[in-house]
Amino acid sequence: MSIQKGQQVEFKSDGPITREQLKNYALASGDSNPIHLDEEVAKRVGLPGIIAHGMLIAAKVAERAKDFVSAEAQLQGFELVKFQSRFKAMTLLGDTPSYGGVVKDFNDQELVLDLQAKNQRGEVTTQGTARFKK
């Protein structure tokens, strides 16, 4: 595959956010804040319901970047060296985010991707920039 600046990174989803995912992420990360696990607590603090951990969604954005580089672009020797994310909105339990974006820059030594997580309503919940170097 030939890579060009401005090229689209197709949006893909790995399914809805589940309670099991959130429980597993809470255990792995040590973030057991009840707004990610308990509907009553989340609503009591003014949220619409359980929300996903922001870093879980950011990790899925980074995973989409790595998948694009290895499986779709089939770039050899490129390693993720920097990833930045910014949270724009909440991802709710049951939402079905998709992850994709655009090639911001590319040459034989570096690739930069601007990516997003969008929910099923098309709202951007997380933005990320992934920088790969050879």
Image (cartoon, rainbow, N blue to C red):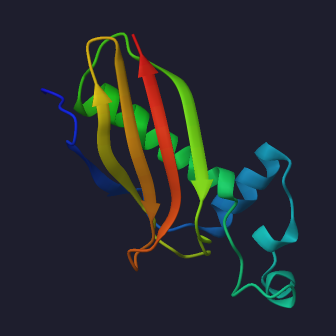
Residue 124 visible from this viewpoint: yes
Task: Please give left or right for residue 48 compared with residue 62 in the image.
Answer: right
Task: Please give left or right for residue 101 compared with residue 88 in the image.
Answer: left
The structure residue drawn at horizontal position 67% and vertical position 51%, both measured from the top left corner, is 55
Q: Quadrant of residue 99?
A: bottom left
Q: Residue furthest left?
A: 2
Task: Give the percent coordinates (x, y) of residue 7.
Answer: 20, 42
The structure residue drawn at horizontal position 46% and vertical position 28%, both measured from the top left corner, is 131
Query: Looking at the rendering, in which quadrant would you find the N terminus?
Result: top left
Frontmost residue, 43 versus 22: 43
The structure residue drawn at horizontal position 58% and vertical position 47%, both measured from the top left corner, is 85
Task: Please give left or right for residue 10 compared with residue 38 in the image.
Answer: left
Q: Quadrant of residue 39?
A: bottom right
Task: Give the percent coordinates (x, y) of residue 19.
Answer: 67, 68
User: Could you tell me how many numbered marks the image carries?
Assistant: 0
State whether residue 21 is above or below residue 132. Answer: below
Q: Quadrant of residue 4?
A: top left
Residue 37 visible from this viewpoint: no
Task: Give the percent coordinates (x, y) of residue 134.
Answer: 39, 10
Task: Give the percent coordinates (x, y) of residue 114.
Answer: 40, 44
